[in-house]
Image: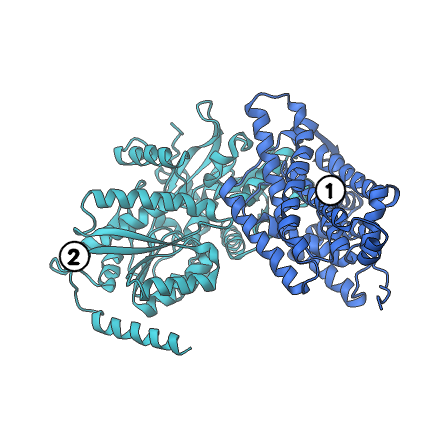
């Protein structure tokens, strides 16, 4: 494997990691605040992608200006993410907050299956795909290999912006600090006058938007088919578990690790490509069962 | 457990009672059909189901099979192997269905073929490709109304050698499951015999349902192989073609071989470039050079399009073959049985010496239950009349050339192929037909 191939593998890994990170970020954020592993997050990814594709098609059909294609991805994510996440929060999540974790898992899994079926009702089973955005950005050449600017520049830029934006929001804004407070201790935060219910709803909506954003950003390069949500959910869970549940910066590094390892394996050992994310997860969890970056939790009592 | 045992005994006694002897003409002929109506493979299952409904309506309008009305019972293959198996048993044992069309997935055929044999019901493998089932074991109740994977892949290699005789390197990007692995094995083994000098520069097996082929595409761009084989289908193939197009991978120097792309052409629209070697898993295409103007075929295409808003793809044609084959089988068995309603094994027996024609060339069935079906291959072309790529320079590879004889195992047969087979490529048998 020579130097140029290493560069190629790094770039493929980075663009893949970017997408993975955005989805994982939503999952880990919701877990941080609610201590619920939201399986329905996979549906948010799928719905985000499908809805973005629908908007993309509408832009072409109604002859709207084509520069709208990129903003439409974000619009799709915000609309579908906040809407769906709010519905989930009001109807299910807030009711199972202090239930057994197994029950929580089952309930969100049920929601996932319901949403998957609804998605089949709405968008059908044929693969859906709208790639206008990628063509607009064009391509560039690195070491004799053509890349799309979309995957090499746009996706990582969005991922970095999401990371920085979220850190700024959690650390510097009043509402963000309330989120952090609820993450640390719900009861104490309530005692201090934080409206925990509102904070929780907000976090879930934000997490949902991130999940849907992952789907929307993937829609110009991937065919959306039934089952795509489950795949992404499992992968992003691998990222979150490797990083440590609730770790935001850690998720970025874990996503990069998994993305890079996967692309290197395609060059060196294509046989194990599918396994790589899970090998990494197992290796990390064997050494650090809490995940790479989680600090040792202080005992509550 | 007791209940299972009991229902098993009950079923067994039913068969003892009704088994081999000829029966009364039933009020209706129930046919169990397994097809994917959920999951990624529903891109095949849903069009096939539409074709089944349409064709069964036609059969019934024309008086049914042997005067008996046909009633389909659909089972979703997407529910998974175990559940499918219990649904299959339920349909046979509780609803008394004795004729099954199963299935699309080779994995499901592997599971269901021995079960059909146990339950003594006729099972037509109507779409699955694995050659191993009928080669490894002799079945009494199981037949297949289309070609198998060996026929499909060896024909593809021959067509590749005709279109691009001088290639030196090949890379494989197939899905990581039985079909992806098996098809690569057949193609590479065939090449080893016919073109031992060809170098395999990469074998990549991304997972089924992969959403990102970025690394595979980078690696292909770095390797610059003469030929890229990709036997994937559905969303996976669509994604690969789109991402490859976006990344500028389709260059005239590389020949892409996509044996299942016929089923994606309409969906992919202008994303499919010209010059891809395209297959359709058999002898069928809506613009089939020999049957495009046949009244029956034209009518099928028109009505299928009116019903589904799409052109029929190969699973719809496979369904047609299974139903036409089944009807011919029943009619043959009725005749042999002196007009009395035949038992499943009599139909299975009649089907083994059948010849029937759906919308391609005539198919003939062999004593091992395998059909001989020609293989349509061609090269994609853009035609201004259609918003998607069409298949041009079509060749109908004769099945006899590319199918192991009865009793031979595929891989051994392939090893015994003669390299001078390639001289056939210039003959009348490999005549090319333009898209019209």
Front position in the image: B48 or A35: A35
- Residue drawn at 56 percent across, 45 percent down: B236
Residue beneath disc 1: A15
In the picture, the disc for residue B334 is 2
Secondary structure category for the residue under label 2: helix
Which quarter of the rendering shows the N terminus of chain B?
bottom left
For chain B, what colour was chosen?
A: cyan
Seen as rendered, the residue at the extreme bottom is B2
Front position in the image: B278 or A223: A223
Q: In this view, does B142 lie above or below B104?
A: below
Residue B52 visible within the image: yes
Residue B118, given in percent of the width and then of the height, sits at: 34, 70
Residue A58, given in percent of the width and then of the height, sits at: 57, 28
Is residue B232 left or right of A242 when viewed as pictured?
Answer: left
Residue B136, given in percent of the width and then of the height, sits at: 40, 66
Q: In this rendering, do the residues under marks 2 and 1 share a single chain? A: no
**Mark 2 to mark 1 CA distance (whole Å):** 63 Å
Asked where in the image residue B249 lies, by quadrant, the reply is top right
Front position in the image: A173 or B421: A173
The count of marks equals 2
Secondary structure category for the residue under label 1: helix
- Residue drawn at 38 percent across, 32 percent down: B433
The chain whose colour is blue is A
- Residue drawn at 53 percent across, 33 percent down: B272
| Host chain of mark 1 | A
Is residue B240 left or right of B320 when viewed as pictured?
Answer: right
Seen as rendered, the residue at the extreme left is B338
Give the class, few, some or many, for how many residues have Cα within 10 Å of label 2's Cα (few <14, many ≥20).
Answer: many
Is residue A237 left or right of B330 when viewed as pictured?
Answer: right
Residue B173, given in percent of the width and then of the height, sits at: 59, 47
| Host chain of mark 2 | B
């Amino acid at each position: 494997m020579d130097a140029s191939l290493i560069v190629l593998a790094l770039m493929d890994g980075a663009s893949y990691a970017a997408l993975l990170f955005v989805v994982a970020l939503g999952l880990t954020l919701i877990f941080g605040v609610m201590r619920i592993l939201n399986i329905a997050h996979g549906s948010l990814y799928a719905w985000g992608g499908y809805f973005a594709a629908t908007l993309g098609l509408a832009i072409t059909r109604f002859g709207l200006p084509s520069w709208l294609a990129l903003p439409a991805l974000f619009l799709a994510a915000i609309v579908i993410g906040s809407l769906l996440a709010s519905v989930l929060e009001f109807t299910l999540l807030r009711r199972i907050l202090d239930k057994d974790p197994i029950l929580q898992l089952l309930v969100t899994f049920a929601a996932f299956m319901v949403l998957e079926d609804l998605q089949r009702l709405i968008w059908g089973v044929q693969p859906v795909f709208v790639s206008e955005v990628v063509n607009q950005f064009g391509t560039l050449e690195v070491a004799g290999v053509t890349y799309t600017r979309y995957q090499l520049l746009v996706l990582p830029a969005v991922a970095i912006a999401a990371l920085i934006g979220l850190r700024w929001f959690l650390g510097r804004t009043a509402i963000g600090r309330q989120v952090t407070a609820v993450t640390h201790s719900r009861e104490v935060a309530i005692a201090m006058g934080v409206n925990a219910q509102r904070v929780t709803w907000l976090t879930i909506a934000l997490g949902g938007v991130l999940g849907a954003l992952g789907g929307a950003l993937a829609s110009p390069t991937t065919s959306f088919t039934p089952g795509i949500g489950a795949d992404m959910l499992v992968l992003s869970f691998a990222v979150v578990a490797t990083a440590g549940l609730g770790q935001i910066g850690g998720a970025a590094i874990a996503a990069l690790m998994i993305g890079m390892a996967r692309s290197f394996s395609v060059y060196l050992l294509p046989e194990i490509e599918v396994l790589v994310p899970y090998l990494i997860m197992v290796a990390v969890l064997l050494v650090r069962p809490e995940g790479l970056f989680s600090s040792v939790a202080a005992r509550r009592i | 457990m007791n209940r299972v045992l009991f229902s098993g005994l009950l079923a067994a006694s039913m068969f003892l009672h009704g088994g081999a002897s000829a029966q009364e003409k039933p009020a209706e002929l129930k046919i169990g059909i397994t097809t994917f109506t959920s999951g990624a493979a529903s891109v095949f299952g849903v069009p096939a189901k539409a074709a089944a409904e349409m064709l069964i309506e036609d059969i019934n309008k024309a008086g049914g099979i042997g005067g008996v009305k046909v009633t389909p019972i659909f089972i979703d293959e997407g529910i998974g192997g175990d559940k499918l198996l219990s649904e299959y048993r339920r349909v046979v044992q509780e609803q008394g269905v004795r004729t099954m069309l199963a299935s699309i997935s080779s994995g499901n055929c592997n599971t269901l073929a021995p079960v059909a044999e146990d339950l003594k019901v006729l099972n037509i493998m109507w779409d699955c490709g694995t050659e191993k089932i009928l080669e490894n074991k002799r079945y009494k109740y199981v037949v297949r109304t289309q070609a198998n994977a060996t026929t499909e892949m060896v024909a593809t290699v021959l067509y590749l050698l005709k279109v691009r005789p001088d290639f030196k390197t090949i890379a494989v990007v197939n899905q990581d499951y039985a079909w992806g692995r098996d098809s690569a094995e057949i193609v590479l083994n065939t090449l080893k015999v016919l073109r031992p000098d060809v170098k395999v520069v990469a074998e990549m097996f991304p997972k089924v349902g992969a959403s990102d082929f970025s690394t595979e595409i980078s690696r292909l761009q770095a390797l610059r192989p003469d030929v890229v084989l990709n036997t994937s289908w559905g969303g996976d193939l669509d994604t690969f073609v789109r991402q490859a197009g976006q990344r500028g991978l389709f260059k005239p120097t590389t020949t892409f071989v996509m044996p299942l792309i016929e089923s994606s052409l309409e969906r992919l629209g202008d994303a499919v470039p010209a010059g891809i070697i395209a297959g359709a898993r058999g002898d069928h295409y809506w613009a089939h050079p020999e049957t495009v103007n046949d009244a029956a075929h034209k009518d099928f295409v028109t009505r299928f399009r009116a019903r589904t808003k799409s052109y029929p793809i190969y699973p719809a044609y496979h369904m047609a073959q299974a139903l036409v084959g089944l009807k011919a089988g029943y009619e043959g068995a009725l005749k042999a049985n002196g007009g009395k309603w035949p038992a499943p094994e009599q139909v299975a027996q009649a089907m083994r010496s059948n010849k029937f024609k759906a919308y391609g060339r005539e198919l003939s069935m062999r004593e091992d239950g395998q059909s001989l079906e020609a293989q349509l291959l061609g090269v994609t072309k853009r035609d201004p009349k259609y918003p998607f790529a069409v298949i041009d320079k079509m060749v109908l590879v004769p099945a006899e050339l590319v199918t192991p004889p009865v009793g031979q195992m595929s891989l051994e047969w392939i090893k015994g192929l003669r390299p001078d087979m390639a001289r056939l490529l210039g003959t009348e048998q490999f005549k090319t037909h333009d898209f019209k």
